Image (cartoon, rainbow, N blue to C red):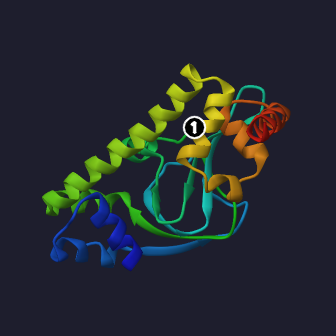
Amino acid sequence: MDHLKAVINSILPMPDQDLERIVPLINCIAVPKKSWLLQQGQVCKYVYFLTRGIFRMYYVDLEGNEINCRFTTKNNFLVDFQSFLSQQQSRYYWQAMEDSELMAFRYEDVQQLYLQSISWEKFGRLIAERVYQQLNERIEMLQFLSPEKRYLHLMQTRPELFSQVSQFHIASYLGIKPESLSRLRKRLSINKRS
């Protein structure tokens, strides 16, 4: 709970009375490695706070390939915002990449928090803005950066992923084939030594 409060306060400092409103709403859940928190066709009914583990958000393209579009590590929120806000079916999967633990907050409870507290309403807006920025960053990375620059950008902005996520999944996230990622890493390694 202390980690959750610290993360909330780092995003928006909140009075203690507002912070305490969230305590009775917490549902703790465990998700085993390779299990899904959300699958395509289901409605995202919760906002989650990850206390242990890592998740990947992916979709399946028309050829049947799994395309990673987001990774969430501990002490971060995760949600399929489109499905959550509209209460419509998701197009994505959220899969645990290791045994994970989360705090879950129901859609109805989140909506009540927004009505009860201007701090929570502002917090919800700030989280929505962060999710938008993360998704837009990936879109622009794929549209405007070469594979090498995508890789270097990920190394600079999310270095922890390289010790937690397989090269296969990183390649998918970067929009390249695993063998292309291997060649790219080898070339960059040689250049670094020269």
The residue closer to the viewer here, 43 or 30, is 30
Residue farthest along the front direction in this orientation: 194
**x and y percent of residue 25 in the render?**
34, 73
Whether residue 100 is visible, yes or no, is: yes
The three-letter code of the residue at mark 1 reads His
Residue 2 in which image quadrant: bottom left
Residue 7 in which image quadrant: bottom left
Residue 133 in which image quadrant: top left
Residue farthest along the top direction in this orientation: 144
Q: Residues within 10 Å of mark 1 (few under 14, many from 20)?
A: some
The residue shown at (67%, 70%) is: 99
- Left or right relative to 174: residue 47: left
The residue closer to the viewer here, 127 or 183, is 183
- Left or right relative to 102: residue 6: left
Against 178, is 98 above or below? Answer: below
Q: How many marks?
A: 1
**x and y percent of residue 18 in the render?**
19, 71
**x and y percent of residue 45 in the render?**
44, 55
The residue shown at (56%, 21%) is: 143
- Left or right relative to 64: residue 117: left
